[in-house]
Image: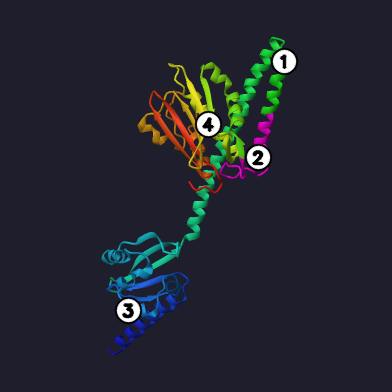
C-alpha cells in the first residue's frame, strides 16, 4: 500500500519537472497561472518581454497585470477557468508598439478532470501584421496608379480626337493656315503623352501614382491644355468658362497636378445642367500659406446625403452618366499624399464647388 503514494509523488515531481523544463527552454513568451490566479511559472522570453522577475512568482496575477500591459487579462483568465471548453484568442499590442496574438487555454488535470489554471501564450505577430499592412498599401497604390495613369492619358487622347476633327475640317475647307495650327497642336499633345509615358517608365512616378519630384508648375498652362482637351464637350454643351488666377504657380508633382485639374474640370463639364446656361469658374488665391484652387459650377449639384460618398472608391451618384466613380477617389489620395486637402461644397440643383488646398512651401504642415 505504501508504494502507491510514493509512485504518485514521483509522478507529480516528474510532471512538475517536465513543465518547468518546457517553460525554461521554449522561445515563446508563456505564463502558467493556477486556478487561484497565482502566477506559478513563466518562460525566459516572457521575463524579457514583460519585465517579469522571479519575485513575481507566487503573486496574484492582478498584481502583475501592469507588467503585461494588457488591462483585462485577469477577467479573461477567470473566464477560461470558469468555462473549460473555451479558448480565448486576441490580438493585443504592448506599449512598445509590438503586436502579439494572445492565447489563453485551460490547463486541465485529466485524471481528475479539473482545471488547475491556464497557460497564456504570446506569439509575436508584429512582422506579420506589418507585412499585411504593406500588402494592403501596395494594393491600394496599384489601384491609384492604374486610374491615375488612365486619367492622365485621357487628356491628350481627348485632345487628339479634337485635333482629328479640326484637321478634317481644315482639309475640307482647304485652309492651310488652320491645318498647320492643328498639326502644331497635335505635336504638342503627342509630347504631353510622351512625357506621361516617360515619367512612368523612368521611375518618376511612385507606386501611389505620384511623381517623385515636386516643382513649381504654371497653372494657366495646365488649365489651357485641359480646356483644349475638353473643348468639344464644352462647345457642344455651350458652357461658359471664366478664370481668375490670382496665383499662377503651384508646387506639386506634375503628372498628379494634371490629374487633379483634369478630373475637377471634367466633372464640372460632365455634370452640367442641360436645363440652364452652364458656367464654370476656375480660380486660385493664396490664403494662410496655401494656394487654393477652386473649380465652381452651376450644374446638377450633389444632395447633402450623398456628399460623403463622393470621395469613396467606385462611388457613382448618377447612374445615367458614364464614369467609373474612381476619379475623385484618386484625386483625394493624390492631394492628401502630397500634404494637401480637398473640400466639397454643393447644393442639389444649384451647383458644386471643389476647393483644393495646396501647400505653398514644401515643408508647410497641413
**Image disc number at residue 177:** 1
- The quadrant the N terminus occupies is bottom left
Q: Position of residue 32 (x, y in %)?
A: 36, 73
Distance in Å between CA atoms under marks 4 and 2? 19 Å
Element at label 3:
loop
Count every numbered label the image shows and give the total.
4
- Residue sitting at 72 percent across and 10 percent down? 174
x, y percentage for residue 129? 47, 56
Tell me the magenta residue range.
Answer: 190-215
Q: Earlier in the sequence, mark 4 or mark 3?
A: 3
Could you tell me if residue 326 is visible in this image? no
SS label for mark 4:
helix
Mark sitting on residue 263:
4
- Residue 58's disc number: 3
Q: Is residue 110 left or right of residue 239?
A: left
Q: Disc 4 vs disc 3: which is toward the camera?
A: 4
Tags 4 and 2 in contact by the CB under 8 Å rule? no
> Label 1's element?
helix
User: Is there any visible trace of residue 55 in the rendered image?
Assistant: yes
Q: Which residue is mark 2?
A: 199
Tag 3: Cα neighbours inside 10 Å, few (<14), some, or many (≥20)?
A: some
How far apart in space, not on screen, are marks 2 and 1 (Cα)? 33 Å
State which mark lies toward you, 3 or 1. 1
| Residue 237 placement, left or right of 167 | left
Distance of mark 4 from mark 3, alpha carbons?
67 Å
- Position of 20 relative to 67 (above/below): below
Amino acid at each position: 500500500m505504501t508504494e502507491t503514494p510514493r509512485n504518485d509523488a514521483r509522478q507529480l515531481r516528474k510532471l512538475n519537472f517536465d513543465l518547468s523544463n518546457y517553460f525554461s527552454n521554449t522561445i515563446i513568451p508563456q505564463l502558467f497561472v493556477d486556478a487561484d490566479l497565482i502566477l506559478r511559472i513563466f518562460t525566459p522570453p516572457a521575463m524579457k518581454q514583460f519585465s517579469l522577475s522571479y519575485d513575481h512568482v507566487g503573486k496574484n496575477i492582478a498584481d502583475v497585470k501592469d507588467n503585461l500591459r494588457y488591462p483585462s487579462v485577469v477577467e479573461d483568465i477567470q473566464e477560461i477557468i470558469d468555462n473549460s471548453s473555451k479558448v480565448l484568442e486576441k490580438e493585443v499590442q504592448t506599449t512598445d508598439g509590438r503586436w502579439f496574438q494572445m492565447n489563453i487555454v485551460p490547463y486541465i488535470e485529466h485524471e481528475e478532470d479539473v482545471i488547475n489554471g491556464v497557460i497564456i501564450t504570446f506569439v509575436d505577430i508584429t512582422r506579420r501584421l506589418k507585412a499585411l499592412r504593406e500588402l494592403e498599401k501596395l494594393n491600394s497604390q496599384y489601384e491609384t496608379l492604374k486610374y491615375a495613369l488612365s486619367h492622365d492619358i485621357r487628356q491628350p487622347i481627348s485632345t487628339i480626337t479634337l485635333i482629328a476633327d479640326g484637321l478634317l475640317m481644315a482639309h475640307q475647307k482647304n485652309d492651310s493656315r488652320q491645318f498647320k495650327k492643328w498639326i502644331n497642336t497635335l505635336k504638342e499633345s503627342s509630347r504631353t503623352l510622351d512625357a506621361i509615358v516617360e515619367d512612368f517608365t523612368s521611375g518618376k512616378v511612385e507606386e501611389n501614382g505620384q511623381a517623385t519630384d515636386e516643382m513649381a508648375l504654371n497653372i494657366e498652362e495646365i488649365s489651357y491644355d485641359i480646356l483644349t482637351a475638353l473643348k468639344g464637350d464644352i462647345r457642344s454643351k455651350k458652357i461658359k468658362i471664366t478664370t481668375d488666377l490670382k496665383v499662377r504657380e503651384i508646387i506639386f508633382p506634375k503628372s498628379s497636378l494634371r490629374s487633379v485639374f483634369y478630373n475637377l474640370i471634367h466633372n464640372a463639364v460632365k455634370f452640367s445642367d442641360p436645363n440652364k446656361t452652364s458656367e464654370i469658374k476656375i480660380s486660385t488665391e493664396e490664403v494662410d500659406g496655401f494656394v487654393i484652387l477652386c473649380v465652381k459650377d452651376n450644374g446638377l449639384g450633389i444632395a447633402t446625403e450623398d456628399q460623403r460618398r463622393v470621395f469613396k472608391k467606385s462611388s457613382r451618384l448618377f447612374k445615367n452618366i458614364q464614369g467609373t466613380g474612381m476619379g475623385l477617389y484618386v484625386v483625394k489620395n493624390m492631394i492628401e499624399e502630397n500634404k494637401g486637402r480637398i473640400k466639397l461644397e454643393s447644393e442639389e440643383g444649384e451647383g458644386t464647388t471643389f476647393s483644393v488646398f495646396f501647400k505653398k512651401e514644401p515643408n508647410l504642415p497641413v
